[in-house]
Image: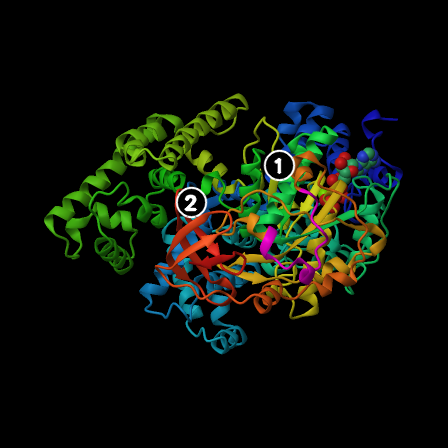
Amino acid sequence: MSDYLEGLNPPQRAAVEQMEGPMIIIAGAGSGKTRVLTYRIAHLLKNGVDSFQILSLTFTNKAAREMKERIGAVVGKSEAKNLWMGTFHSVFARILRSEADKLGYPSSFTIYDSQDTVRLMNSIIKELGLNKEQYKTKAILGRISQFKNNLITVKAYRNNPELIEADTMAMRPQMGAIYKAYVDRCFKAGAMDFDDLLLRTNELLVRFPDVLSKYQDRFRYVMVDEYQDTNHSQYLIVRALADRFQNICVVGDDSQSIYAFRGANINNILNFQKDYPDVKTFKLEQNYRSTSNIVEAANSLIEKNKTRLDKTIFTANDEGGKIKIMRTLSDGEEGRWVANSIFENAMNLQKTYDDFAILYRTNAQSRAMEDALRKKGIKYKIYGGLSFYQRKEIKDLLAYLRVIINPNDEEALKRVINYPARGIGATTIDKLTIAANHYGKSMFNVLQDLDNTDIKIQGATKNKLVNFSNLIEGFQISAQANNAFEVADEVVKRIGLIKDLQGDGTPEAVSKVENVQELLNGVKDFIEERKEQDLDNSLTAFLEDVALATSQDSKEDDEPMVSLMTIHLSKGLEYPYVYIPGMEETLFPSAMSINTRSELEEERRLFYVAITRAETQCYLSFAHTRYRWGKLIDCEPSRFLEEIDEKYIEHLAPQRDKVVANRFVDSNLFEDDIPRDKIRFRKPVSRSIRNQDKPAEKKTPFKQPQNLKRVTPSLAQKLGTSKPAQKLAVGNKVNHAKFGNGEVLQVEGTGVNIKAEVKFEGIGTKKILLQFAKLNIL
Ligand code: ATP
Ligand code: MG
């Protein structure tokens, strides 16, 4: 018996030992699907399969790295290095680099991220003279993404009267023209967006049979994790590559399919059985990740979905604690509760912050969480959202590097042509864009050849343009002789980036400078790391690495930190303690996803994914009021809370915290002014035992979930009827129980949102929400 297979149960082992032919594992969360893939690769290698011949597609590059490490431990690091492993995007970007010329692209093509594509689309809509309201950038880009993921090219679109009609009906008759302009501009800029990486790979495999044959021969064993979330384009690539040897193994869970909105197609699982009639199907039924309370709670939830494959999932793990539900008055208070609870759990249970994750439905929710964690001195890292590489100063510097590698990259060029400011204005840039379109050249080519174009540019501006193009050409020459770090360092110095960022020496400016330094450190690390591994360490390779760093791939820090991310990004991951805040109607399920059963079922699957990330304990919370779109809104608890079998749930007693609220509402004001009886909060615990002095989870039996409904819908409404907003005017002298006397400087907002800015003697200016504060006019 080979001991490296010992850590598998019999069905897992059977799947690992099935080396040849098509196979599929559809099984519930935490049942070891990813583990089986990892072991299976090790097993193939142990049985003489060449490491270069294995292609394994994962959901994140981080997952691929971890798998490689584990496989390396069994078969040796150097063998594991040869495996083709990564996300669809990173693996096929790599292939496209070496085949780019066949498609008319430079091998140094740029990968446009979402900011680039938004900028490009904005400019196309403007150039075509279309109405911005009618042609909303994000909606148009979403539509184009749909086309690309279904392999509908511009030509195919034009030949498809149904699609054209659908867009006309949707008041977007110019969709075809926009699509064409977008594709042309990307092509001319030598740029591919994320969907292109798949679309162009398909194009490559279809148009060039010899290329297809080469990769079919190379990838004799193909594996795909999270197969339920592959889109049509990805499906076709996998099918084409595996066609010759048919050694294809896919794993997934239909209950975790959460990317339908981005074109993922659950039918790929069903099609798989049709495509490969002799497919072997494996079932994994034991969950190793979570306590039985978590597994059962998740099961009871997902049963509410009508469309799902029949699966059993059980666990031999301990029962564990029940799923805990907390409710708070506001999102700010929710954040503080989460931070306190993490702090206390870490202290009391001897855990490190790495053991905790906060998973939310929308990125915007991170702010309240971040504020609370920061105030409590808890370190955290955010996956997704504004990651390091999305910060402006970093994007600016990267844009220089991109232009050096690919001067046709129009979005990068536009970003840097007048940054740091060198007197090249928007009008000049517009003229250059028009000229580039007119001559069918790239903007940089126009710049280099200003004398031979008939754009009217004044002498002084012309000099600035010539200087700029000389600057870039100088960098290009330097890039031929120097490594990526030397080039980046030279750029920073020559363009005076540090000086520009230092500006007024504010903490923000300092942090920007630090970020730039950090990027340079990053380039250096990259070069060293690649050198060690004998891999490409050119500037092109660095930029690709950055462009494809999925948001989960942020650099690991040694210090333990709480992980914050959207539920979408948490797929495949696991944490001992998971917090899911914002369990409210219109937030989760999202207001945009409650109109059809299939949308609602996808939201439920998303919730299922969130719960099943937890190993030991799962906390859910909701707030009665929340700031959304700049307004205070009343919230109703999520319907999903009632869908989990009550057996597995425990309601925590609400606690008022004493920390000063971050916005204009001082939470002390809650103490006196909120008619608690009306909102059915339990009596607050006494002050001395609030906060860290006491575990947050003070268990109090609570007659729920029926009560959940009754506290809703409208805290503010109830408050409003019981206590009308005061009529205050600027200049009024007022008294506040805590802050003393002051003068009203400003009154703004309406209804329950009326707030006053009051200058209190000896205290300073405070914003007070009149709904909550008692201000007596003197
Ligand atoms: P998800 O659906 O969330 O992606 P999964 O099915 O891929 O989950 P894994 O991540 O592979 O599940 O496994 C879940 C956890 O259970 C991991 O920590 C894994 O190491 C552990 N595990 C799986 N199988 C076994 C086993 N036979 N013995 C011990 N631990 C196991
Ligand atoms: Mg997995």
Q: Amino acid at mark 2?
A: Thr
Query: Is residue 71 at least partly visible in the picture?
Result: yes
The numbered mark, 2 or 1, whose residue comes first in the sequence reads 2
Give x and y (percent) for residue 293.
83, 46
Q: Is residue 665 above or below residue 688?
A: below
Quadrant of the frame with the N terminus: top right
* Res. 399 mark: none
Residue at (70% x, 45% y) in the render: 685
Ligand 2 falls in which quarter? top right
Q: Residues within 10 Å of mark 1 (few under 14, many from 20)?
A: many
Q: Amino acid at mark 1?
A: Val
Pick the residue in front: 684 or 557: 684
Give x and y (percent) for residue 11.
87, 41
Residue at (27% x, 56% y) in the render: 433
Pick the residue in front: 279 or 64: 64
Q: How many marks?
A: 2
Pick the residue in front: 170 or 743: 743
Give x and y (percent) for residue 308.
78, 60
Look at mark 1 in the image and give the residue it sits on. 562
Query: Is residue 637 at least partly visible in the picture?
Result: no
Q: Residues within 10 Å of mark 2 (few under 14, many from 20)?
A: many
Quadrant of the frame with the C terminus: bottom left
Give x and y (percent) for residue 347.
69, 30
Horizontally, residue 70 falls left or right of residue 514, namely right
* Res. 110 mark: 2
Label 1: which secondary element: strand
- Residue extending farthest to the left is 459
Q: Is residue 718 above or below residue 327?
A: below
Q: Is residue 732 above or below residue 701?
A: below
Numbered range of the magenta stretch:
671-686
